[in-house]
Image (cartoon, helix red, strand yellow):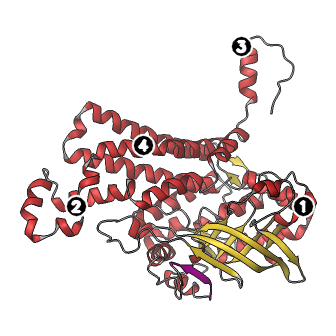
Amino acid sequence: MALMTGKQYKESLNDGREVYIDGERVKNVAEHPAFKPIVDVKARMYDMPHEDRYRETLTATLPDGEVISRAYNPPKSKEDLTAIRNHVETVLDDLGGVVYRVGDETIGEMWSLYDAQDKLNEINPIYADNIKYHIDRVAREDLFHVSANTDPKGDRSKLFSGKDGGTLLHVVEENDKGIVVNGAKFETAAAYAHQAFVKPTILDWAAGEETMAPFACGFICDMGSPGLKHICRTSLGQGRKEEDYPISTKFEEIDTLLIFDNVLIPWENVLFHRSLQSAAYIRSTVHRYSAFNYVLRMLRRADYLLGAAVLNADQTGLTRLQAVQEKISQLINYREGINAHLTAAVANAEESPGGLTMPNQSLLYTGRVFALSNFPAMAHLTRELVGGQLAVTPDTATMSDPAIKEYIDKYYSVGEWSPEDRGKLLYFARDLLNSSLAGHNTTFELFAQSPPFAQQAAVFNNFDLDPQRELVKKAANINLKQSVSV
């Protein structure tokens, strides 16, 4: 059986990887206080498919009988896409929170590259073989696979003019073993993942083939590779009480600056190399599948906003007021808007160039923009419905102090709501909306897959405008033979 257990996952992280956080090198990633909560979450995800109640939903069987994670089974039908949705929602139901970088969403980027195999075969057939091998390997070995995309920001004008690549990841040497790379990438969860699909994010390759070729590479990198250094940001949840911060203390995902210091990438791990065409293609299609899982997580975030708002209105009897119902309906509209895009993306799924089934691209990308662009307003609306108590409620230690219990009981009891339950609701809402992690996640979500302008570009590039052109030409009796298109 290919499926890993949580215990095996934790043990697999002790591979000598070089991880730094808060001024120290981490000796045991799985047990370090900054990483332990999220490693425990991922370990739980590894354990779930072994349980009878989850086995059918969370696993799939390969033609040779090998049982793998449902998340790593490339979709070949609408039913497969529905099964992926059920997988994500079942996992989030069990965890009781939202996690973004856990492998099921990043494997989709490999499927996007699989769709490019014909193009890659024209360059070098070995690269297409490597892609198919690694898609199969991730599934059979149940690897935690992430995606290293974001570049440290430097002076891009030098790159575009062909003068200097700066800190951008690039190939510095080729030998009989593989390519040697230098540079850096940012990636969430890298410090506790098994491997990453590393690729360029450059949009402008105008400097030319010869100048840009060293930057046009994509490969699989083991996270314990010699020369690879993980420099991690400080945890926002570490040291906080779980009762006061029920989200931050469980579901914080740690971001890493990956330093590639002459890291050898074996030839079998190279997915494309010195190919501007391949680099440009993967940037335009990289979220073809992965955006589906990502927007599913935004749907769950919307559910938490709606639930927190309604419960806070319920406890004081305000749900029956028309003005409050109007605000709640706006949250429902938001939630159902995301849901409608996801549902329609499956119902109108398309065959991919590689013969897989991909969510309808226009509906998927517009759903992503809808979810992300409206989230700040919906979060603010939730704050309004929760009220000022979100900012002024004492912490659990004060609320449980025997010396003031009679006052807490008097002023924090509302109907059937005890002070303890009211506190739990307010602490959850605070962590969802106002904590350091809440602010971090809002920014993370906005840029996690691509910056807003690139998300809008994906919408533009995946919508067929010709039917609207023809509709207006016909209605206006325009005899223009050919429309001008971009």
Q: Earlier in the sequence, mark 4 or mark 2?
A: 4
What residue is rendered at 90% in x and 61% in y?
A: 211
Circle 2 or circle 3, nearest the eye: 2
At x 45%, y 53%, the residue is 300
Q: Which residue was labeled with disc 3? A: 475
Residue 211 tag number: 1
Q: Secondary structure at mark 2?
A: loop
Q: Is residue 124 visible?
A: yes
Q: Are marks 3 and 1 in contact (CB under 8 Å)?
A: no
Give the mark nearer the N terminus: 2 vs 3: 2
- Which residue is at a point 57% across and 56% down the rendered structure image? 293
Marks 3 and 4 in Cβ contact (< 8 Å):
no
Mark 4 vs mark 1: in front: 1
Q: Position of residue 474 (x, y in %)?
A: 75, 15
Figure quadrant of residue 259: bottom right
Segment colored magenta: 16-22
| Residue at the farthest left position | 406
Q: Quadrant of residue 384?
A: top left
